[in-house]
Amino acid sequence: MEVCQRASTYCLLQSASADVTQFIRVNIFVLALIGRRQTFIMNPKKTGWKLRIEHSFEQLGQMLGKHPGRWLLGCLLIIAGMASQLGHLKQDSSIEGFLPEDSSVVKSYIDFKEIFGRDETFIITVQTDDPYTQTFATQLHALHQQLMDEVPYINSVDSLANARHTYGADDTLYVDDLLPETLPDDPAEIQKLKDYALTNENYQNFLISADSHTVALIVRLNSFAYEKDSSGELHRRYLDEADMLTAYEKLNDITTQYQGVISDEVDLTGGMPISLVLSELTRLDFIVLSGLANLIIGIVLMIIFKRASGVFLPLLIMALGVTITMSMMAILGTPIQVSTSILPAFLLAVCVGDSIHLLTIFYRYYDDGAEKIQALSNAMGHTGLAMLFTSITTAAGLLSFAMSELTMVSSLGIYGALGSIVAFALSISILPCVIALAPVKRRPVQQDENGVMLRFLGGCADFSVRYAKPIVVIGVVLLAGSLFIASQLKFSHYPMAWLPQDNPYTIAIKKYEERMGSTSSIEVVLDTGKDRGILNPGFLRAMDQIQKEVVEWDTENYKISKAIGITNIIKETNRALHDNNEEHYSIPDDPMLISQELFMVEMDEPDDLYNMVDKDYRIARLTITSTWFDGVYMQPLLDQLRTRLDTAMAPYDVSISYTGVAPIMGVTFAKMLISTAESYGLAAISITLMMVLLIGNVKLGLLSMIPSLLPIATVLAGMQLLGMRLDMLTMLIGSIAIGLTVDDNIHFMHGFRKLYEKTGDPAYAIKHTLMSTGRAMLITSIVLSLGFMVYITAQMTIMASFGVITAACIVLALVASYLVAPALMVLSNKTIHKQDVVLEDGLIVAEPILTQTQGTVNS
């Protein structure tokens, strides 16, 4: 089994990079010393493989302590080489980045953008008493033209300044500007234009509100950018987030210029700025709050350890862990996404946790009089195996996420697992080297200072032993009740709720929806499969009927505002050609007439036409606009729409696909629910197997999962009782929670089994495990919970929830490891020989000797 573990760890790192493989290979030298065979029977004669591993860690500590400079220099050179690639690390908040490139959903979206361009928009809203005044018309045209001239990567601007006024006169079709730069002199003519705008279904509540007091400019960017390489050849690439931020900044600048000029209320809103603001705030919150968390952790470590090395070393290991993991992402071309942006927080937990465990034991041996290298060797022997198991267990749990079909989830699994192994490697390589080189002073432990912690830990041990049965009963009942309550948790994906309510973009988009009715859209692509296929009157009437029906599908969760397609242009043109008679606002019966009408539109306004159909008249676009609603309701809406369209389009053999940012997010979220649930199941199985291996007993391994699962189940139940919902980020928080809860449990179980095998006394083993390993668990939990509570000050509500939920998991994991895990061990392990050995400062000073009758300690 050890050989399999060694091969598994090696393969994980080998797949990442040759450089990191060399680095990790050196750092996990200890694995090469693991014995060739194993056993699951827990007795002193058959646990040699664990003892050999512990002895190997002690030897590694001696080796690193004697030649720290060489090892440290070699490791730092490798890390520096990897860090040089950080400049290539990119951020990707695009919808395409959520799914694999070969996904049918992504391919459909790319095909859509190839034909029709982007569906995400920037919206500039202008409040006015009357848009049909000469002053306003002049300023609106100036704003429209400035946007076209100055905004980078711009594709189009739709506003009243270039909207169509289609009418017929003297058997001639006219297409003029709906709001000309120079208004007619006749007030009656101006009123006709205004009435046309307010009654036209293409423009009402899109470019102008029903009360005519809000006017909108819809800005779309190109899907691609064209650049020349060094040889002068032109290459096409997709716009990335940096490009869109450049355009966004210019739009913001132009909007500010017109504030107080065209109107006192000019706002920039729309789906695109909301997406960019969310991405930017997520990045800033993690950067700023991670730094603040490090500061808080440093202060707490100084208070606890009372020495600079106790502060500097854990933070150093954390910084190097983040650097290596992010460097690997840059080397392998993986961008930072919403999911992987929580990696620094995760690495903060695992790196600081491993460091604190090693330092706590080292300081105790060192302060007790041992030489530095010997104290280091003892500490590595004491904690190395537990750290190895926590790292492998956490990595195994996270690797279950790597099988997800969602890129954002699989990336978190891959790099979270890699980060866990990197944290372990740093803790057993660089940390010992720095300890050996640093001038660490001995600090006499004050009796009263030490006594407080020992009394607390001893009290927890005595309480868990004395009331083992009630604690286990309460724990099991609490776990069952929590799982039942947690099963009623509802899901949500509503990014608008992540922003502060006073955020200007949140306010602007709510105003726009109140006045215009919609900011989100579903794009339906209808492919007839043949050139000029959309000219079929039956097909167009079926499409028109669906447009009329879908706007009536409002529910309490969303409101559908408009359904726009080629039918609107055809009906508008047909009416104009029949002397503006409203009775002819319909689809003609003759395909030839339809063709002629579209030809006339193409002559005057080709951009408007090709925004609705492709140039071969084979594919038609149907855009359904709605309020921005919770993504959890998107799939039912798409199912309803699919059923209706399949029925309506069945006679015409039309291929139907659904795309756009909103539906892709809805589908992605639905897939994420299934994918994440499967990943958590696989993680639970992986962790259970590792616990069985560590403890050496199937029954006890299964029982040990109770304190591992209890904190997570309790937090989920608390979320349900508080009315919170599981969203994209809080579901991924479980990956951090799993690592943290299992870490505490493994450290306790490792210490307990080690002492129980020697003594046969579970009560003794529990008390002295908590007084030694439990000290490091307490320090780690205090430090990390305070560090994560810093996130409560985040600008984004989802970040605040992240901090509170993670801190709660950390505290509850400690309680479970202090009470529930010991109680389970008392009830499941017999007392073979009662011990009475004194402990000094949490360290065993006299090891008990097994009598002949204690040759086997069975659980």
Image: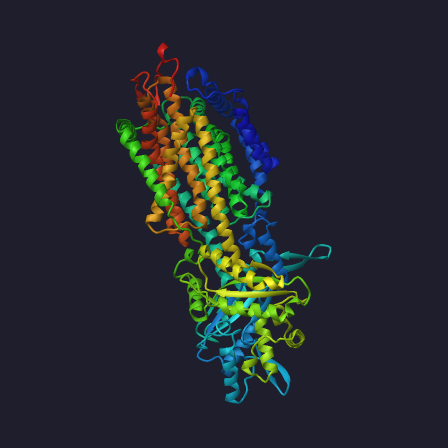
- In the rendered image, residue 253, in percent from the top left (x then y), is placed at 51, 66
- In the rendered image, residue 186, in percent from the top left (x then y), is placed at 53, 89
Note whether 501 is above or below 821 in the view shown: below
Location of residue 239 by image quarter = bottom right
In this figure, what is the number of numbered marks? 0
Location of residue 144 by image quarter = bottom right
Q: Is residue 455 visible?
A: no
- In the rendered image, residue 62, in percent from the top left (x then y), is placed at 49, 22
Q: Residue furthest bottom?
A: 186
| Colour logic | rainbow
Q: Residue at x 53, y 31 (%)?
A: 72
Q: Is residue 377 visible?
A: yes
Q: Residue at x 53, y 22 (%)?
A: 33
Identify the image quadrant of the C terminus. top left
Note whether 457 is above or below 201 in the view shown: above
- In the rendered image, residue 647, in percent from the top left (x then y), is placed at 55, 62
Q: Which one is in front, 215 or 378?
A: 215
Looking at the image, residue 392 sits to the left or right of residue 540; the answer is left
Note whether 587 is above or below 407 in the view shown: below
Q: Residue furthest top?
A: 852
Q: Residue furthest front?
A: 651
Q: Which one is in front, 758 or 490?
A: 490
Q: Which one is in front, 297 or 283?
A: 283
